[in-house]
Image (tube, grey):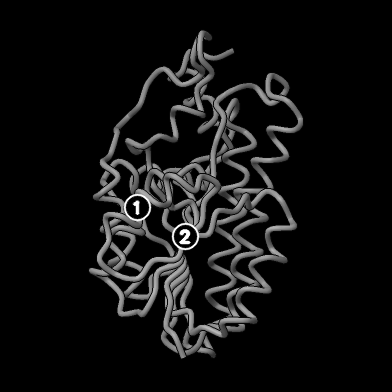
Amino acid sequence: MKKIVIVTGASSGMGRLFAETAPEHATFDELWIIARRQDRLEEVKSKLSVPVRCIPMDLTDRASYQTLEALLKEEQPDIVRLLNCSGFGKFAATTDDTLETNLNMMDLNCGAVMAMTQLSLPYMHEGAKILNIASVAAFQPIPYINVYASTKAFLLYYSRALNRELKSRGITVTALCPFWTKTEFFDRAIAKNENPVVKKYAAMYEAKDLVARGWRDMERGKDVSKYGFIARSQALLCKILPHSFVMNVWMGQQSLK
């Protein structure tokens, strides 16, 4: 039975780094990388010396799940690692974005992760591991990043609850919760030619450090992974302080009304 690792969102950002570093952290026969852009997937493949299968797929299109389900039934692989890294965010008032954008955000950030996980689980066995990219934003309600933060809260609680469900099968689920991280995420999150909603960043971490921490904590079976003192402190304070106060601090920090 062929052992595989699956990485979604593998064409850019942390997804790409997880794909490129997979041979250093897991033993497998083939790496499956999923994203919309075939050319970007081929770039990732060209950098790796292990067998790679490029699967161009739009995970906001539910027909994609049927394609993947058929492929899994045909191949009958042993999925040893699943890394759900696809997702995007928008920094704007909820009503300033189109309904289509917000629905796509929910579909990709939440629905795609749930679908990929549910389709993969029949092919996962004891010792298999899942990592979902959530966010420190999952710990608090954030005006003007409302939909994005809410999707990450879903991922955090979904991952933690699923980790408990799968304990008896020897499969772990880790929610990686990055703070602000240098990736292409901001190219889509911030509307061009407009005053940005986010004006101040308490810290900006390197993607390679988050990916390294994600691999480490996933292999250790941790259900939540955070990197950096500021990120850990903010997550802790959001558990202690009233969320109304936390939102007031955020609004003041970003000079929002």
Q: Position of residue 166 (x, y in %)?
A: 56, 82
- Residue 50 pos. (x, y %): 29, 70
Q: Identify whether 165 is placed above or below 230.
A: below
Tell me the crowding category of disc 2: few under 14, some 14 to 19, or many 20 or more residues within 10 angstroms, Cα based.
some
Category of crowding for the residue at label 1, using alpha-carbon neighbours closer than 10 angstroms: few (below 14), some (14–19), many (at least 20): some
Q: Residue at x 37, y 59 (%)?
A: 225
Residue 178 appears left or right of 98 = left
Q: Secondary structure at mark 2?
A: strand
Q: Nearer the viewer, residue 137 or 195?
A: 195
Q: Quadrant of residue 136?
A: top left
Q: CA distance from mark 2 to mark 1?
A: 9 Å
Q: Which mark, residue 54?
A: 2
Quarter placement of the C terminus? top right
Amino acid type at image mark 1: Val
Q: Residue at x 39, y 66 (%)?
A: 52
Residue 11: image location, x then y, percent: 43, 47
What residue lies at 51% left-to-right and 83% top-to-bottom?
Answer: 77
Q: Is residue 79 above or below residue 175?
A: below
| Along the viewing direction, whichever of 118 and 40 lies nearer the viewer | 40
Disc sitting over residue 80 in the figure: none
Give the residue pinned by disc 1.
44
Dot placed on the residue nearer the N-terminal end, 2 or 1: 1
Residue found 74% across the figure and 58% down from its top:
63
Dot 1 lies on which element?
helix
Does residue 84 lie above or below 189 as drawn?
below
Name the one closer to the observer, 80 or 65: 65
Residue 117, position in %: x, y?
59, 69
Q: Amino acid at mark 2?
A: Cys
